[in-house]
Amino acid sequence: MRLHRLIGIIMLLDSRGIMKAVNLAKILETSERTIYRDIDILCEAGLPIMSIPGPNGGYSFMEGYKINSSAEGLKSDDVFTILLSTMGINPEKNTETSAQLKNAVIKLENSLSEEHRQEILKAKDRFFVDASPWWGKIIEDENIDIIKKAILDLKKLKINYKKYGGQVSQRVIRPYGAVRKNSQWYVAAFCEKKNEIRVFKCSRIDSIEVLSDGFTMAENFSLEEFWENSKEQFVKKATSHTPTIIYPVKVKLIEENIKLLDGFKIASSFKKEDNWILTIDMISFTTASNMVFPLSDRIEVLEPLELQKFIVEKSAKILNLYKAFENK
């Protein structure tokens, strides 16, 4: 990771001239303190980097010093990383692949004319993509770079895979391809234990080891076709499964108040005279009591008995608390 960052600093100084530490840190997604340490390392290695004081100052190579960091220096790994980014598949932050992509883009910038290079820099300043959700965070897969390389090199992987229930099993897999969906990575791989091609969620891989054994992919394998079929089977299985009602609550209410229970699964419903009788899964007694009591002037709980008792007892406590108002 440090090596790619050092190369990034060299190419940025070579292509853009004087650059402040804060700008280098922003582009390379690191801290200013780290940039200062990296500059010291480059100077100790003999690179003629000088510090220019003043408001327009920063770091720069000595006048006349130039490095060939144009697109002619792009390697096959660089081209592959750029290709993935054009498909909307960007590397995880603070990974070796992320640093490699930045360096590859800098090489491309250096191959352009000054006019076009300024247009690119202007666009970078004026457009920003924030892929993070409003709540929660994107799960970063630490092993995805290893998996990508194993896919390209046709190398087997030994993994400890955590199942949905928490059990961990060891597998030897032949990674055929990787798919990114909803900000999460999945690998389509032949599982030697199950003797079939399966989908593994990368975030559930506890540990990973690249084996020296190679493998040959089936000639007729299509990643896109396999993924679409797997996705279709998953949706069918999920929709055909009848979920268990964890904490059923039967209530009586008028039709206009049904919207008060939005978000809860309605297991059954029928109309009786002017009211509706609903059975709702409220997950737990705690959730039900917290949800239903504030609505107890508009919703009548018919079952379970413990929830009825809770509402009655709590209402009695409230009435007792305000009993003094009866004499006023």
Image (spheres, rainbow, N blue to C red):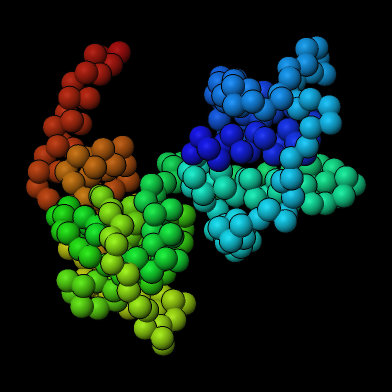
Q: Is residue 62 visible?
A: yes
Q: Position of residue 14 (x, y in %)?
A: 75, 36
> What residue is rendered at 55% in x and 30% in y?
30
Q: Position of residue 218 (x, y in %)?
A: 36, 83
Residue nearest the viewer, comparing 121 with 282 = 121
> What residue is rendered at 41% in x and 87% in y?
220
**Residue 146 found in image quarter:** bottom left
Residue nearest the viewer, comparing 212 with 33 = 212
Is the residue 304 above or below the residue 222 in the image?
above
Kindly give the residue lying farthest to the bottom in the view shown.
220
Q: Position of residue 54 (x, y in %)?
A: 80, 12
**Residue 122 found in image quarter:** top right
Image quadrant in which the C terminus is located: top left
Is the residue 51 above or below the residue 89 in the image?
above
Q: Position of residue 140 (x, y in %)?
A: 42, 46
Residue nearest the viewer, comparing 11 with 181 = 11
> What residue is rendered at 43% in x and 59% in y?
149
